[in-house]
Amino acid sequence: MAATVIDGKAFAANVREKVAGHVSRLKADHGITPGLAVVLVGEDPASEVYVRNKGKQTVEVGMASFEHKLDASTTQEELLALIDRLNNDPSVHGILCQLPVPDHIDGDTIINAIDPAKDVDGFHISNVGLLGTGQKSMVPCTPLGCLMMLRDHHGSLSGMDAVVIGRSNIVGKPMAQLLLGDSCTVTIAHSRTKDLPGTVRRADIVVAAVGRPEMVPGDWIKPGATVIDVGINRIPAPEKGEGKMKLVGDCDYASCAEVAGAITPVPGGVGPMTIACLLANTVTACCRANGLEEPE
Ligand code: NDP
């Protein structure tokens, strides 16, 4: 039986609609407009697309968007001075610095300079520690989006075997923490994992966050398992014409969809959820900053 396709695009639209509702209530009842500041240093084309989309969607849900595009030659001190200003600006409730930053700037220093209460990416060391100890934190957007879709599909995840492929600080590790928090039995696989196919075959839930196009074939998937494909890989698509490209995930969609119980497509799966969760985190940060009840 073909897998259920988890429609991240529709799910994200629903999240954005809820966020827009919270924003209009914050404005009407409290006179507060949540604000998100996005900082981009340099001219990475992919980052520019992400930042543009973030700004557009921020405005669409009624929030204030503050974009800071800095020259690639910006010094670390100048960037830290901007972060300090944003930390102290009461109209800014969320701050994110688009990664990667140029080589002469230390990304960790910048992330850890953001006020943890405004760290809507959830990458500040305090938020990482709070998440790891099961305390209230800012949760990284991509893994949060994956968790929301998994909870929606399964209800409870308790007792399920989950394998996360990839151990990055922005996806793999926080994803594993969230699944553990929902009482899954979690394995984190990576490039040194000895028997990756055998490890993945045990999983009721597979989250692939590797960055290698179509690396996971269908015969690694346990029949009926749920496959969450985080990967975004641009590969040549000669079938579309000369020089054309297409996006694929880390899983071979066609063969995985034959075996899985449910699967997220690429594009249209995890990707749209990431920005939706960023907007939701900004509303959460705004509510916390103002001592108001935060949305679920
Ligand atoms: P990283 O490059 O930081 O991490 C990749 C991980 O994959 C590493 O832990 C690495 O292991 C592991 N890995 C690499 N090769 C193999 C292999 N052959 N077998 C098993 N594990 C392997 O990537 P990110 O976590 O930043 O991103 C992963 C993917 O998710 C990318 O395609 C990225 O574009 C996408 N992404 C999508 C987002 C979205 O919104 N949908 C947001 C963020 C990322 P090791 O640690 O041993 O090197």
Image (cartoon, grey):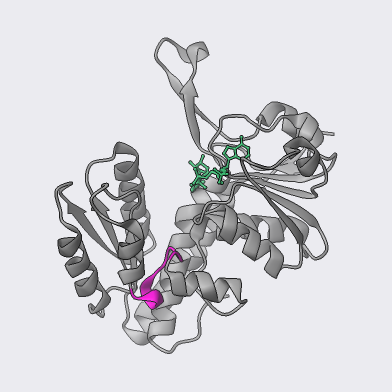
Q: On screen, 280 above or below 189?
A: below
Q: Quadrant of ligand 1?
A: top right
Residue 256: x and y in percent read 73, 33
Question: Which one is nearer the viewer's eye here, 272 or 80?
Answer: 80
Q: Residue at x 76, y 36 (%)?
A: 197
What secondary structure do most residues of the magenta stretch adopt? loop
Q: Quadrant of residue 221?
A: top right
Question: Which one is nearer the viewer's eye here, 158 or 154?
Answer: 158
Quarter of the image with the C terminus in it: bottom right
On screen, residue 254 versus residue 31, left or right, reads right
Task: Tell me if I can see residue 19 in this picture.
Answer: yes
Q: Is residue 161 magenta?
A: no
Q: On screen, 149 above or below 282?
A: above
Q: Which residues are magenta?
A: 115-123
Quarter of the image with the N terminus in it: top right
Task: Tell me if I can see residue 138 in this picture.
Answer: no
